[in-house]
Amino acid sequence: MKQKFNISIIKGDGIGVEIINEAIKVLQKVGSIYDVEFDFSQYLMGGVAYDTTGDPLPQETIDGVLQSDACLFGAIGGQKWDDLPRELRPESGLLRFRKALEVFANLRPAVVYDELIDASSLKPQVIKGVDIMVVRELIGGIYFGEPKGKTATKGWNTMVYTKTEIERISHVAFKLAQKRDKKLCSVDKANVLDVSQLWRDTVTEVSKQYSDVELSHMYVDNCAMQLVANPRQFDVILTGNIFGDILSDEASMLCGSIGLLPSASTGEKTAVYEPIHGSAPDIAGLGVANPIATIASASMMLRYSLGLPKLADSIDEAIKQTLKDGNRTKDIGAFDAKYILTTTQMGDTIVSNIR
Ligand code: NAD
């Protein structure tokens, strides 16, 4: 029987509209080949939602996304809404959205495409073959811990993790490692922080349920260094909110352009798949945005939320083939380009390479 999935779509603002349109085309093509049907329902969020409804995150959007199998998200924000009161700004809508969906696990793969090896600031021999998955805890740790506050002479935040919070993100990371190279590096600061010692003890305890995964521990300062010194040693990196914030940005820059990098935010409810970049108002409407990060996010959605790894592989291969043939958007146009394509042309070329 034909498999059917309901996908909620949030295009958002700026280039969000352009890049999501390309990802939808790719999903439709891969669905038609593998006999899988995707029903897309669009919801408003961000500046466009504010303009239409007066709220950057209408309740209808939360309800619709919660009822869907997965959400594909473009980007929100732009100067037009920057002077609104904070609670009405698109970015506040995004934080409320993540909270409403309780997406505690942020997955950010950093894959270096051979064809774009010169796009990185590191030497090709260091980054060739890099394929890292950073798993970052997203709704706990120092960004949320109490007490926090500031006076004229003192500022303070609290880094708190409960055992339960560490366990649930650990399970996500170990399960991912099982599907990859079965290597997990947990990153903490256990030599100094008590909360990190609990992190380390708990990850070690959870690891007993995943005997096929090789666990190692690393201090965060060393990890920051190792990521640029020898990034190929990593498969899955598991870490907390603030360390993951910093390390995932560092890891993503191994790859070249921000227009290439997908992400997933997952929890117990509907997961959200989105490029790591924003709405790029400077290039919105010009047809030059790179849609690859969004198309790769759609691939992650198939793999992690919908259990369709063959379809995900097919998209990933199509992206690689497209780059191999010398197709580039403007952001990566300086690296072995044969053809500089518009956003739509890049989407169409990836569609035509799906087998
Ligand atoms: P940005 O990621 O939108 O853009 C940074 C730079 O990268 C710009 O020069 C842009 O042109 C370029 N760029 C981004 N995506 C690209 C793509 N796919 N192809 C080619 N070039 C690309 O970050 P910013 O300029 O700091 O923020 C712009 C707006 O986006 C702000 O309103 C910000 O709040 C919002 N934002 C939203 C999200 C989100 O929706 N998840 C994330 C980050 C920023």
Image: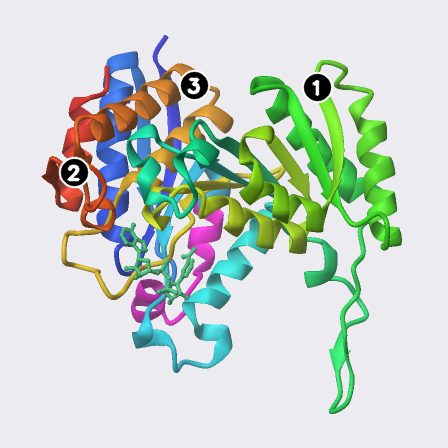
Give the x, y percent position of residue 136.
62, 44
Q: Which residue is mark 1?
A: 213
Q: Magenta segment, which residues?
A: 47-64
- Above or below 76: residue 317: above
How far separated are the C-alphas under marks 2 and 1?
39 Å
Residue 170, quarter of picture: top right
**Marks 2, 1: nearer the viewer:** 2
Q: Please name whichever residue, 32 or 217, is drawn nearer the observer in this view of the structure.
A: 217
Q: Nearer the viewer, residue 40 or 141?
A: 141
Task: Report whether the residue tagged 3 is closer than 8 Å to ligand 1.
Answer: no
Measuring 59% from the left and 45% from the top, which residue is drawn there?
103
Q: Earlier in the sequence, mark 2 or mark 1?
A: 1
Say which element carries label 2. Answer: loop
Q: Which residue is mark 2?
A: 337
Q: Amino acid at mark 2?
A: Ala
209 and 252: which is toward the camera? 252
**Ligand 1 shown in quarter:** bottom left
Q: For residue 308, which numbered disc appears in the image?
A: 3
Instruction: Give amino acid for label 3.
Output: Leu
Are the residues flagged by discs 2 and 3 in contact, CB closer than 8 Å?
A: no
* Marks 2 and 1 in Cβ contact (< 8 Å): no
Quarter of the image where the C terminus is located: top left
Q: Position of residue 250 (x, y in %)?
A: 52, 50
Regarding mark 1 in the picture, which secondary structure is present there?
loop
Residue at 37 percent across and 60 percent down: it is 76
Instruction: Indicate which label's residue lies in the foreground, 2 or 3.
Output: 2
Can residue 69 be seen at all in this image of the molecule?
A: no
Kindly report which numbered mark, 1 or 3, lies closer to the viewer in this rendering.
1
Dot placed on the residue nearer the N-terminal end, 2 or 3 = 3
